[in-house]
Each structure stands twice: as structure tokens, then as C-alpha cells.
Image (cartoon, rainbow, N blue to C red):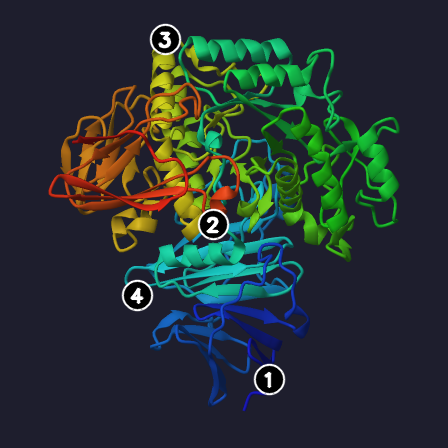
Amino acid sequence: MMKHEQNSRFVLCETSRGTLGVEVVAQDILRVFLGRETQNYFSKAVEADRHEDCAFTVTEEGDTLVIATPALRLAVDAAGRTDFYTAAGKPLSLAWRGARSVIDRGLHDKDLLEKEGHKDAGSAAGLPVEELRALLPDDAVYGLGDKPTVLNKRSYAYENWNSDIPDPHEECFKSLYKDFPVFFVSSAAAERTYGIFFDNTFHTYFDFGLESPDYLSFGAKEGALNYYFFAGPTLREAVSRYTWLTGRAPLPQRWALGYQQCRWGYASAEEFRALARKFRELDIPLDALHFDIDYMDGYRVFTTNDKTFPDFPGLLAELKAQGIKAVTIIDPGVKVDPKYYVYQEGLQKGYFCKDKNDLVYVNEVWPGDSVFPDFGAPEVRGWWAGLQRFLTDRGESGVWNDKNEPASFRGPLPDDVQMHDEERLTTHAEMHNCFGHNMAKASYEGWKAATGERPFVITRACYSGSQKYAVVWTGDNQSLWGHLRMSIPQQCSLGLSGMAFHGTDIGGFGADCTPELMARWIQAGCFSPLFRSHSAMGTRVQEPWRFGDEVTAIFRKYVKLRYRLQPYFYDLFRECEETGLPPMRALVLNYEDDPNVHELNDEFMLGDQMLVAPVVEQGARQRMIYLPKGDWYDFWTGEKQEGGRYFVREAPLDLCPIYVKAGTILPLYPEQRYTDELADPELTLRCYPGEGVYEHYRDNGRDFTYRDGAYTLYRFTLSNAHLTTTLLHDNYKPYTKINVEYV
């Protein structure tokens, strides 16, 4: 008999591992934790009391305790091992009960290895906090955010420790800027899918079959074993439930879906004026210009260099009159300067992190000696939120949080730097991975309070749940074909991990972009939710006209296409807020039962209707394409293609292969120079042969009144080459004209 106690929500079992707790979050979500103190664990990701009332039973079967909901069965044995089953008793995920393997690396002289410049890869085996679970031979593993690697992470190992690594990102990198400790396991043969969210903010480790093909493991150096189990039964449902738990990306302002231009090195107001003129002269749509660190006074945040940017509000007003928004960068490092108001105020109020000796911790970032706000403390987040008014009052439309891993120039912040977890004092070791998350949360709340509009906050570092507050990009990539290829599984993995609004630096941030690479990157980037080009000072300047007339024309073609597709993108973000499904999707999210897509790294879906197959190889003028079963239509030619097969598509330099599912009703807008240039755009519905139903959504694209019902919702039904329209909700201005075209 296993000693246990229970109430309406929790079951606590006494095992040889200690007190193992189970929280019944919902019928298809269980939380497992070790230690009574973890029962009321404060999660950074699960910020509301996410709980659905659910009847469950607790029974003893020999020396095993069985907790059963209408959807899940969890068996806990005396050793604290946990086995998950469907309600019908079909295995979902079993604890590993075999021997532990250690990789044989043939290491007989470690000193010699390191003298030659190599590192011992080591092993994460034997962590103080650890869980091992059995793997099936055909298990595929997805998620974990923007690791610089392939879509299916089976046979790889990773770490979560938010890191600013300037070297060109490669598959061997264990971690980058973001921390999404969530993964999903899918087996076509076993016909089951499950997800696990390991909610631990310390340095965490994941091994998906590298150590042994028989099991996966996840663990941490410190903290608690605390994870949520999602029953599936499909990948779509598991992702949807994970985002129900941790939060979903809110509907963005409509302009945020337009094209945005940035460079580290735009150093004067005149450069920005010239950029705006050039984009308009060349008829390339543009919605936003981003201001990197050059606009500040000595890199002090919440200041302006009045010599190079005189009358900054006037500049922003000029740009706004042309339909161009301004987004400015803000770093967490606050310059040590007794005459600087942000430093003075933060120091006086005790808002900066302290070292183990209770002295304000100082390191170096852009402005030189800098201190770091303790964003884990509610009062510090409130202070930082208030500082956002400096930006909003002078006309900015968004904020870009950078260097918030946190990054520093004189080595990383020591683990023992003091930080708060709400009211509790803890250390950097625990708060590091959610430092960027808390900064983004403060920024979001500040912008919302100041403007009443949907905030546009970009963050480089984040944690699970940050999708409620921020947009991300994949960080300092390079102008390399390998990084263009990598951008597809990176972004698809971000979407699977809950972060739906994401992008890459189009053209690459570091190194020199070539004309061909820029042409192919703008084609792929056209379909990323965040559509931003960005490059570094000291690299080839990357405005589209810098690459010759041919590339300029290609750039214009795809930016204009993005604006025509804007109503479709907006509909996808509405769907995302309701379901958690990302606009840009790995094919496996839609076609999980098709083994051909389980490791497809160079194609993706845009919603359920469009398939995009960018060219990602230098010199390629053809590419192999796989279409899932069904009928598909070439976006450019209208040619019908039968799915369930591979074929070769011609792909000259100006063409990105795009295919549309049969029965699709695709909403399109006219060309515009910027979002909402046309106050009342005509809606065009492009109808592809077949049967289909599509819901199209419209609101003011700006504030939160849609949550009070201020929107219009159409339902279009396509049958026998005939389209019918139903107005489902009518509380915003309807279209004055809707055009229909048949392919």
C-alpha cells in the first residue's frame, strides 16, 4: 500500500524519491512535481490559475497508485516512477526502467584535447533533478524553441541557458537566446502524441536519444522536478493545450505585419529621412523603421543624441505622416552615471541587482559600466513600465528589447548575483532564463497603460509564456546560405513552442550578403510573421537597392505580395489567439499522419491553406517539392498538382514556389505603400476549385475594443464554383466592395 493524500485538485504520494505530487490541471493535463514545497510553485509561464474542474479517481493497483481522469491515466509506483496512459489504457509515455548509458567518447587524454583547442563534450547524466522516459524507435521530437538545428530533434541533446553567442550559429550549439523548455513526442506507428513542459528556470538539459536511443531525459542543476504532461492525442491539440496553459500570442496591431527596415549603423536623422524617401521613390512598401543603439546619448537608455537626432519627436512625426512607424531599441544595462536620471532613480529606490555582498552589481555593456534592473521584483517592473512613457510620449510605435539574456562584456553575470522572484530573494542562477521574459512583461504593461493600444514589443531573450507579451527574432544570424536554410526549422520550432510571432534578420545580420542570397531570403521572409531586414555595422549595407535592379525588383515583388496577403495573415493571428496554432507551421502540425513530413526542414505551411517551398541553395533554379495528399494549385500559374508525391518545380531567381490547397478561399487586399493607406480597401476573394469554408475577420487593427465585440466576421462558403457569404458578427465597418475571382 502506498501512503498518499488527496483533495479536489492534488494527490501527494510518498515514494522512495520523496513526496511526489500530481496536480490535475485538466482532464488532459497533469502536473508532476517532487516535494511538498513545490505544490504552490509560482510559475513564470503559467501566470493565471489555469485549471479546469475535472473529476478524477485515485485507486491502488498492487504497489501502484493510479490517478485517472476521463482522458488520462497516471500510474505512480513506490520508486516514484510515472507511467502515462490514455483513458483506455494505451501507453503514452513510460518511465525508463533499464540501465543508464554513457556515451563512449574515447577520451584518454583530456589535457591534450584541450591544449589542441577542443572541448570535452561531457555528459549531463546524473543531474540532481532529472527524469528519464522511454523512447520508441520511430518517436520524433519537436519544440524547444529556436535551437539552431533541424525540426525533429531526435538523437540530439540541448541546454537551456539564454546566451548571446556572436559566433555563426551552428547545429552543434546547445543553446541560444531563448528558453522554451517544452517538447512534443510523436509516433506514427504507435499513433500517439504527448507533450512535456519542464517548468524549471535554472540551467536545464535535454537529451532526446543521443545518450541512448532507448530513452530521453530532461533535468536541471538546481530547482525542482516540475513538469506538465499534455495528452495530445495529436500534435495540434498538444500545442493548443500548451498555449492554453502558458498563454497565447495576442492579436497584433495590423501595421506590425508590414515590412520593417533596420540596421545597426543608421546614425543620424538624415539617414532615416533618406531611407523613407528612397523606399517611397522605388515603390517598395514600408511600415516601420527601427532605431538601433546609435540614436541614444552615449548609449544611455531612454535618452536621445540631440546632436545627430535633433528634434527627435519632429522626425518621428515626419515619418508618421508618410505612414512609417518608429521602433527604438532599449537594453537592460543602465549606465553608471550620477548625472543620469534613470541611474539616479533606480539607485535611490534600490531597483538594481546586487552581488553576494549586497553591493550593486556592475558589469559592462554598450554604455560602459552598467547596472541591471531586478525585473523579477514587481515594483521594478512597475518602474520600468513607467519609463516606457519616454518613448510613447515622443511618438514611438514599438520597443525592441535587446541584450536581455542578460548579455555583458566582462564575462557573464555570476550565478550568485541577487535577484527577486516576485517578493522572494533568490539568485541569478534561478532568474537568468526568465530575465528577458520579465523585462518584456514590464515593457508590454507599460505600453498598454500608456497608449491603450496593442503593444509591439520585440525581445531577444525570453521564456515559455513570453508569447503573451512579445515578438521575437532569431538573433544575430549571418549572411550565410546555411542560416537561410536554418531559419525555416528554427521558426517552425518557435511556433510549435508557443511563440507564434517570430522572424529572422532578413539577409543576415553579420557578414556580407550577396545579391542572390538577398533575393532568396526576401522570398522566404515574406511569409515569416515578423517581416524585418536587419544588418550589422561593418557589413555590406543591405537596403534592397544596394544589390542592383534585378534584386530590387524581386524585393518589391515579394514585399507587395506580403501586403496583398495581409488580411490572410491577420486572420491567422486571430486564429492563433483563439487556438494557439501559429501562422507559420511545420507541415507535421497539419499532416502528422504523413511520415514524409516528419523531418521536412525546407517547406512550411502558412495556416492550413498555403504551402511555401523557398529556394535555400545557392545557384538552384529548380527545387524538389513535396505536397501532402490532396489537390494543390500553383499560386503563380494556377496549375493543378496532385499531392502525396515529390516533384521538381522550376524556380528562377524571381520565383518562390507557393501552392494553395483545393477549396481555398484566399482573402487579398489591393497594393498599398503601408498598412491602412486605404481607409476602406476592397477585399478580393481568390477561390480555388473544390469545396471550402473560410472565416474572415476585420477590426480597427489597433486597440483592444475587439475583445468587447468591436469586429466584423464573415463566413464564406465555396461549393460547386459558387461562393455564398454569411455575416456572423457585425460590429465594425463592413466592406463596401468584395470582389470574387475564380482560379
Asked whether residue 582 is in view, the answer is no
Q: Around disc 1, counting alpha carbons within 10 Å, would you say few (fewer than 14), some (14 to 19), or many (20 or more)?
A: few
Q: Upstream in the sequence, badge 4 or badge 1?
A: 1
- Total marks placed: 4
Q: Around disc 4, counting alpha carbons within 10 Å, would you say few (fewer than 14), some (14 to 19), or many (20 or more)?
A: some
Q: Which amino acid does label 1 sit on?
A: Glu
Of the residues tagged 4 and 1, which is closer to the observer?
1
Q: Residue at x 41, y 10 (%)?
A: 282
Q: What residue type is labelled 2?
A: Ser
Q: What residue type is labelled 3?
A: Asp
Identify the mark at residue 549; answer none if there is no mark.
3
Residue matched to label 2: 497
Percent from the top left, x then y, of residue 55?
A: 46, 78
Residue matched to label 4: 190
Is 354 left, or right, of 721 in this rendering?
Answer: right
660 w.r.t. 212: above or below:
above
Q: Upstream in the sequence, badge 3 or badge 4?
A: 4
Q: Do the residues labelled 2 and 3 touch (CB within 8 Å)?
A: no
Q: Residue at x 69, y 34 (%)?
A: 388
| Disc 2 secondary structure class | loop
Q: Distance between the residues labelled 2 and 3?
A: 39 Å
Percent from the top left, x then y, of residue 109?
A: 61, 48
Q: Around disc 3, counting alpha carbons within 10 Å, would you say few (fewer than 14), some (14 to 19), or many (20 or more)?
A: few
Q: Upstream in the sequence, badge 1 or badge 3?
A: 1
Q: How far apart are marks 3 and 4 (CA)?
A: 53 Å
Q: Nearer the viewer, residue 154 or 241?
A: 241
Q: Do the residues labelled 1 and 3 touch (CB within 8 Å)?
A: no
Q: How far apart are marks 2 and 1 (CA)?
A: 34 Å
Residue matched to label 1: 5
Q: Distance between the residues labelled 1 and 3?
A: 73 Å
Q: Which amino acid does label 4 sit on?
A: Ala
